[in-house]
Amino acid sequence: SQQGEEDPQALSIQEGENATMNCSYKTSINNLQWYRQNSGRGLVHLILIRSNEREKHSGRLRVTLDTSKKSSSLLITASRAADTASYFCATDYSSASKIIFGSGTRLSIRP
Amino acid sequence: DAMVIQNPRYQVTQFGKPVTLSCSQTLNHNVMYWYQQKSSQAPKLLFHYYDKDFNNEADTPDNFQSRRPNTSFCFLDIRSPGLGDAAMYLCATSRDLFGSNQPQHFGDGTRLSIL
C-alpha cells in the first residue's frame, strides 16, 4: 500500500522560476523525507523534517510540513536545468524502521 | 568518498535463469535495504538487513532472496526471473535500524532486463 501521494505527477517550468511539489500521506508520521532521483540514477536525500517541525530550509530548498492536513510541500527556488529530476517524499509507516515512498513528481526545467 | 556501489549497472538475463546483483558500502552502516523500482514508479522495499538480521516484506515474492556475508556486502538473488521482474534494483544503507529519522544512502542501481 502507498502512504504518500504526490501532486502534480509532472511539472514543467521555465529556468529561474520556482517549483512547488506537494505530498499527502494517510497516517500519522514521525518524520518525512524528500529525495531526488536523476534519470537512471539512485536516489539522493535532500531534507528530513520531523513531525514537530513546520519548516526547514537547505540552500534553494524549502520544505513545509502540516501534520493537521497530513501534507508536506517542497519548494525549489530559482530553478536550474540541473534540477530536472523526479522528486519523492518518503514517510515512515507501521514502525519507524522503514520508509515508504510516494508516487513522485517529475520536474522538467525548460531553458 | 564513502559510498554505496552496485554492480553491474546493467544486467541482462534469460527468463528463468538465476541472477545475482551485488551491493557494497564503505559507510559502515548497520542497515542495508533492497528496493525494486519499475518505470515511473516509486521504489518498493523488498527486504532489509539490520546487521545479520534479515527482514522480509510480506509481499516480496519467494523468488527473491538476499545474503549479507559481512557488513560491507549484500546480494540480491532472483532464483527464476520472470518478465515481470524487469526493473531497476536499488540498494540503500542507513546508519541505524530506525531508518525514518535518518537519511538513506542509495547506490545508482542495477537495471535488470529479462529476455
Image (cartoon, rainbow, N blue to C red):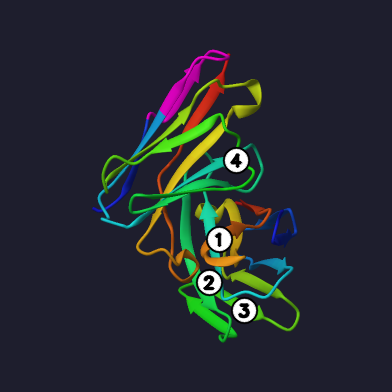
Q: Along the horizontal axis of the image, is A78 left or right of A20?
A: left
The lab-note entry on whether marks 3 and 1 share a chain reads yes
Kind of residue sitting beneath label 4 = Thr
Q: Does residue A96 appear to the left or right of A4 in the view shown?
A: left
Residue that carries the numbered disc 1 in the rendered image: A99
Please state which amino acid type lies under the numbered disc 2: Leu
User: Is A40 a magenta residue?
Assistant: no
The residue lying at 73 percent from left, 84 percent from top is: A68
Q: Position of residue A83 (x, y in %)?
A: 54, 56
Q: What distance separates the C-alpha of mark 2 from that of mark 3?
A: 10 Å
**Chain holding disc 4:** B
Label annotation for residue A64: 3
Give the percent coordinates (x, y) of residue B4.
Answer: 34, 47
Residue beneath disc 2: A61
Look at the image and give the residue range highlighted in magenta. Answer: B8-20
Instruction: Please tell me which residue lies in front, A94 or B11.
Output: A94
Callout 1 amino acid = Ile
The alpha-carbon separation of the residues under discs 1 and 4 comes to 16 Å
Tag 4 residue = B60
Figure check: B102 above or below B83: below
Residue mark closest to the camera, 2 vs 4: 4
Separation of residues labelled 3 and 4 (CA atoms): 33 Å
Label 2, label 4: how far apart the Cα atoms are: 35 Å
Label 2 packing within 10 angstroms: few (<14), some (14-19), many (20+): some
Q: Residue at x 74, y 53 (%)?
A: A9
